[in-house]
Image (cartoon, grey):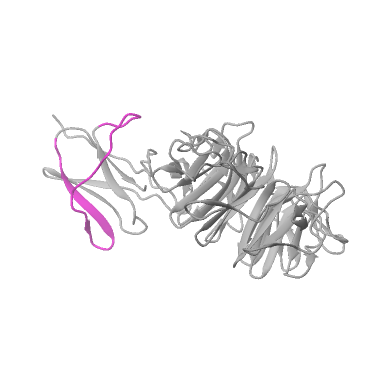
Amino acid sequence: MPTRLFLAVALVVAATFSKALAGTISDANWTVVGSGMNGTVLASAVSGSNLYVGGTFTNASGSNYVARWDGSSWTALGPGMNGAIRALAVSGTNLYAGGSFTMVGYLFYSHIARWDGTTWWGLSGGVDGDVDALAVSGTNLYVGGSFTTAISTVNHVAKWNGFAWSALGPGLTNSTGGIVDALAVSGNDLYAGGSFTMAGSLPVNGIARWDGSAWSALGAGVGGGILKFVDAIAFLGGDVYAGGLFTKATNNGGVVVAATNIARWTGGTWTNVGSGLTINLGANALAVSGGDLYAGGSFQNAGGNPASAIAKWDGTNWTALGSGLVGGSPPTVFTLAVSGSNLYVGGAFTNSGGKSCARIARVYLGTIPVLSLIRSGSQAVVSWPTADTDGFALEQATALGAGSVWASNAAVIADDGTNRQIAVPATGEAQFFRLRKP
């Protein structure tokens, strides 16, 4: 019987039989994250090797609205909440959660709470409305949302210093209230985004900067369309990126820049980011890894090219992440979190990179390594590059398909600094090999 040997390179179950171009993200880079969630994932945060997610789900190891992924399984964080979690932030060993909940277990914690690894704690009465954004700077926690009071009047944004609440000047408002949807810290500055238009008597139009004592505008902000707001803020190369739902950004002097759902503030001036993110609604989440910016939302086109709900900006061009996300009406990304070479994606979708998933998925941002095979007498030598393959494990199966059983290969791996390799017997039976990154 002739020997049959097969190669497959995979992160979990995806396979590729040809070398991927460096920097290209294909469907093979997408993997599932456990069994996923039965409700929308709205927030995420990374601490070490742990991923925390929040949303409207109730099924992650029995958890209500919040759970932790340790790389292999989901665990609950205490009794959970009685309402959705919309924002998460990590500070040291503490996890802060904000949302529409008013209770944690049987305790009344109004819209915000702190998890110390064992127990949930309240923050001195909390706030009187939904929390939609959190950001940490040193020992300070900044909180944004639709609330107007945190002990005293704060108007949609406040600071918690570990002991007490305080206002950030007059807060951020519009004629019907105003919501702070995004907060991000750069150096000593806090940037806020949302549907507000004023900081006291100062026009700010969707985005503003707090320097510790006063608010300032970024040009004349963003606008255009019936609905207009900033839902995400990120920093890359000294520039501020703002994503949301808008059609323009306006510089000082009234100079308008066409900017569809994403814009860049650089050197005191708004510029567009290619031709932006179009079709359906805009951008809900931004994340940075290396020199690349990742945007997620409900768009279906990035820079004039098809990109389903997620795309990468490399400073010059937009590119899709394989076939992206499908499912949902439309498929929507609400949160992105980077952990090493992994990008975690949460939202409302049922398929990522051609694989069934439930509202959360992972993208490997590195180049997928390629296995090679050389027959040598009664043995076969399986090899792969040493570079960028730390953390990958070689696995072997006797069949390829949905029911395949993959086992870790016990052979000794040789490494000459350029390539890693093993020699396995050519048994006469079909053998499949893959590299897997847990």
Q: Residue at x 64, y 39 (%)?
A: 300
Q: Position of residue 258 (x, y in %)?
A: 77, 52
Asked whether, in this view, residue 349 is left or right of residue 194, the answer is left
Residue 406 within the segment the image draws in magenta: yes
Q: Position of residue 69 (x, y in %)?
A: 45, 46
**Prevalent SS, magenta region:** loop
- Image height of 417 relative to 412, above or below: below
Apparent side of residue 66 relative to residue 5 in the rendered image (left or right): right
* Residue 365, visible in the rendered structure: no
Q: Nearer the viewer, residue 9 or 328?
A: 328
What's the residue at 44%, 43% (across, down)? 75
Q: Position of residue 110 (x, y in %)?
A: 67, 47
Magenta highlight range: 399-427
Locate residue 225 relative to residue 93 in the image: left or right.
Answer: right
Left or right of residue 323, residue 124 in this image: right
Looking at the image, residue 419 lies above or below residue 321: below
Q: How many labels sit on residues?
A: 0
